[in-house]
């Protein structure tokens, strides 16, 4: 899922400093699961904003909503009847949701309430970790199911570099060396011959470097 | 002979090679690198010029190599893939070749976390193995990575680094094999302090006959003090400094530690010279270039052959 | 509340929004939670609310968590006194003052 975390409150307060009536909108998708932008976080953020503004003698009116998803037009449509009553939206969706909300409602500004960090997994309650960088051309079958692009600090396709020490990456003793993980896994799978294959120069055009990406499925299009 | 490289000539003729390195200055003054390089004249066969090592911004390797070339010295241009994509890489290779630079060392480069611009975005369009492939492709196929032909070819003698002391140890020999498949012609190793482990690595290299496919230059770095040895042991990633070396430096008076460090370095070279498959020594005297000649001299590496 | 583990971040924030001067949670002794970790979760939530209060310039001391068993009546009295004293020293909360001003403009 997409992992995010709440922005510092002072940053959000600065965005809405001149607003008196705002809409705080959460998303029930990924950001609910990683406790960054679901209904609970909408309540907490709204309450915090009200307290901060009350304290400054500058009260603010907030409507709290949480949509099924902010990345699908049909759910965004649900705000149509009331959004015009507000001066701004603080969206607790990922960057995609914030943008899609802004695309659909052009009259008022839409501000990000969270920072979108990565595509990752819940390692344990309260701990999330990156796994994929959406390069658009998966090679996990060659690397023991561990992605060198996401897991190696240098995204080396033919690692590890000389900075791998006792299973850790040179940048931080708390960061596992992605290539050590790949090596260990290939050994477990008795597929170490894969390690000696030179991974060819990558076509990054399937990734972000090819410009904003789009997928069109004619079989599904209306 | 595939290139006009002096280093290649020496190695191809079966002579034992000696290289050293120069770090470019943190400024615009070319005299800094000239002074360092002059200290190495006739003491070594070729001089590595680092490329923003430890991610600290310095004068570019390519410009510094040109300065060395103008002095009649033989530079080895280090190139990291951290800061350039394949467009810039190929362009710099052409530029270097046009200036008569004939040696290149292909590296991934230290992560920017170590440097003075930690907020930078790294590139890593290619990794070091793919950089080897790229130079080889340009030189031997006469083509860009795109497949388009290029006018003339860059005559680069192609090198790479390897750290026999990094983990996992078991892949350090296969990794050399991988670099050989990519087209590497010489390897300069990380500083050798743990000779036993290095010998173990060389056993692995010989067992697969890799020493016949690539020239291996063993790296050495003299300690200036026990403080430096401790720093290398604890702070520099992938460095293996055995405790007995630290004890040995500690056992002599502070003002004698530098001499002891030099003595230790010479002993190490003596042992490295005897290892089958070691084709040369790479002396990395960090900000201590004035000692390289002495080390080479006392290790019986002088005079350098004229080729 | 059946357990401090049922107290959520928003409950504490709403109390402050309502204009209270202080909030304290009294949970069972650590290690003695009937639901195993309810009181430990409560403590983490209290810590989060304290951070929120500080981040907007409100005194985090207005919120406290205590642990004691149901049999410790005298300790409870002590805690109540301690908390009352603390809040008195801090004075009324900024939120309460603003609310009063809003309701009774001079």
Image (tube, helix red, strand yellow):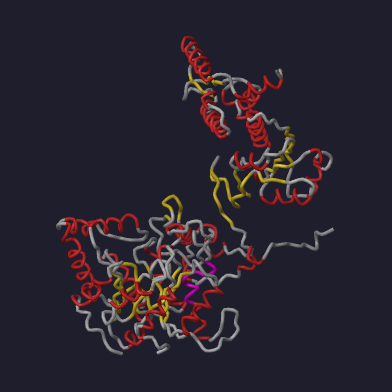
Q: What residue is rendered at 47% in x and 57% in y?
A: B118
Total marks drawn? 0
The answer to which of A183 and A73 lies nearer the viewer is A73
Q: What residue is rendered at 66% in x and 48% in y?
A: A94
Coordinates of residue B162 in the picture (x, y in percent): 38, 69
Residue B217 visible in image? no
- Name the side, left or right, on which A122 lies relative to B216: right
Residue A174 visible in image? yes
Coordinates of residue B27 in the picture (x, y in percent): 41, 67
Q: What residue is rendered at 66% in x and 22% in y?
A: C18
Query: Is A203 rendered above or below residue A56?
Result: below
- Name the side, left or right, on which A132 lies relative to B34: right
Answer whether residue B130 is magenta in the image. Answer: yes
Query: Is B197 rendered above or below residue A5?
Result: below
- Name the side, left or right, on which B195 lies relative to B59: left
Task: Say which quadrant the C terminus of chain B sits in.
Answer: bottom left
- Name the side, left or right, on which A218 lies relative to A120: right
Q: Which residues are magenta?
A: B124-132
Residue B43 picture quarter: bottom left
Query: Is B140 rendered above or below residue B284?
Result: below
Coordinates of residue B283 in the picture (x, y in percent): 29, 72
Q: What residue is rendered at 45% in x and 54% in y?
A: A176
Task: Say which quadrant the N terminus of chain B sits in.
Answer: bottom left
The answer to which of B299 and A184 lies nearer the viewer is B299
């Amino acid at each position: 899922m997409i992992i995010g975390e709440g922005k510092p409150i002072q940053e959000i307060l600065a965005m809405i400093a001149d607003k008196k009536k705002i809409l705080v909108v959460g998303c029930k998708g990924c950001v609910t699961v990683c406790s960054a932008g679901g209904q609970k976080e909408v309540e907490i953020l709204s309450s915090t904003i009200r307290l901060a503004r009350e304290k400054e003698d500058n009260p603010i009116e907030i409507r709290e909503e949480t949509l099924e998803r902010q990345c699908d037009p049909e759910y965004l449509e649900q705000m149509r009847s009331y959004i015009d009553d507000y001066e701004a939206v603080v969206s607790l969706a990922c960057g995609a949701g914030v943008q899609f909300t802004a695309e659909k409602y052009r009259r008022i500004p839409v501000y990000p309430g969270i920072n979108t960090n990565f595509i990752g997994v819940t390692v344990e309650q309260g701990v999330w970790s990156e796994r994929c960088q959406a390069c658009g051309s998966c090679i996990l079958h060659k690397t023991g199911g561990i992605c060198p692009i996401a897991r190696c600090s240098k995204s080396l396709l033919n690692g590890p570099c000389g900075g791998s020490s006792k299973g850790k990456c040179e940048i931080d003793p708390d960061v596992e060396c992605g290539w050590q993980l790949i090596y260990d896994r290939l050994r477990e799978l008795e597929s170490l011959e894969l390690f000696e294959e030179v991974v060819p120069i990558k076509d990054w055009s399937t990734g972000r470097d090819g410009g904003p990406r789009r997928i069109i499925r004619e079989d599904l299009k209306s | 002979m595939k290139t006009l490289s002096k280093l290649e000539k020496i190695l191809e003729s079966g002579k034992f090679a000696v290289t050293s390195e120069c770090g470019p200055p943190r400024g615009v003054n070319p005299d800094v690198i000239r002074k360092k390089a002059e200290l190495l004249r006739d003491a070594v066969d070729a001089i590595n010029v680092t490329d923003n090592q430890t991610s600290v911004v310095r004068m570019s390797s390519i410009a510094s190599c040109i300065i060395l070339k103008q002095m009649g010295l033989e530079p080895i241009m280090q190139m990291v893939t951290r800061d350039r994509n394949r467009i810039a890489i190929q362009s710099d290779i052409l530029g270097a070749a046009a200036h008569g630079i004939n040696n290149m060392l292909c590296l991934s480069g230290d992560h920017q976390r170590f440097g003075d611009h930690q907020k930078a975005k790294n590139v890593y369009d290619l990794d070091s193995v793919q950089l080897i492939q790229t130079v080889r492709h340009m030189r031997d196929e006469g083509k860009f990575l795109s497949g388009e032909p290029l006018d003339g070819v860059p005559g680069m003698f192609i090198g790479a680094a390897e750290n026999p002391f990094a983990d996992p140890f078991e892949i350090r020999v296969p990794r050399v094999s991988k670099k050989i498949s990519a087209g590497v012609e010489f390897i300069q190793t990380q500083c050798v302090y743990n000779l036993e482990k290095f010998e173990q690595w060389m056993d692995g290299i010989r067992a697969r006959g890799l020493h016949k496919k690539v020239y291996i230059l063993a790296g050495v770095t003299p300690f200036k003090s026990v403080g430096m040895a401790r720093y290398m042991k604890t702070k520099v990633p992938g460095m293996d400094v055995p405790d007995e070396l630290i004890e040995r430096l500690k056992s002599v008076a502070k003002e004698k530690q530098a001499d002891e460090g030099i003595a230790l370095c010479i002993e190490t070279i003596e042992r490295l010279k005897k290892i089958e498959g070691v084709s040369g020594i790479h002396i990395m005297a960090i900000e201590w270039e004035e000692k390289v000649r002495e080390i080479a001299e006392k290790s019986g590496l002088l005079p350098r052959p004229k080729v | 509340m059946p357990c401090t583990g049922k107290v959520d971040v928003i409950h504490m924030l709403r109390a402050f929004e309502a204009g209270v001067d202080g909030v304290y949670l009294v949970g069972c002794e650590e290690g003695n939670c009937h639901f195993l970790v309810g009181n430990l979760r409560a403590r983490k939530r209290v810590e989060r609310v304290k951070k929120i209060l500080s981040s907007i310039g409100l005194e985090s001391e207005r919120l406290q968590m205590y642990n004691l068993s149901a049999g410790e009546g005298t300790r409870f009295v002590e805690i109540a006194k301690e908390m009352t004293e603390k809040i008195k020293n801090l004075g009324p909360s900024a939120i309460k003052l603003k609310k009063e001003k809003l309701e009774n403009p001079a």
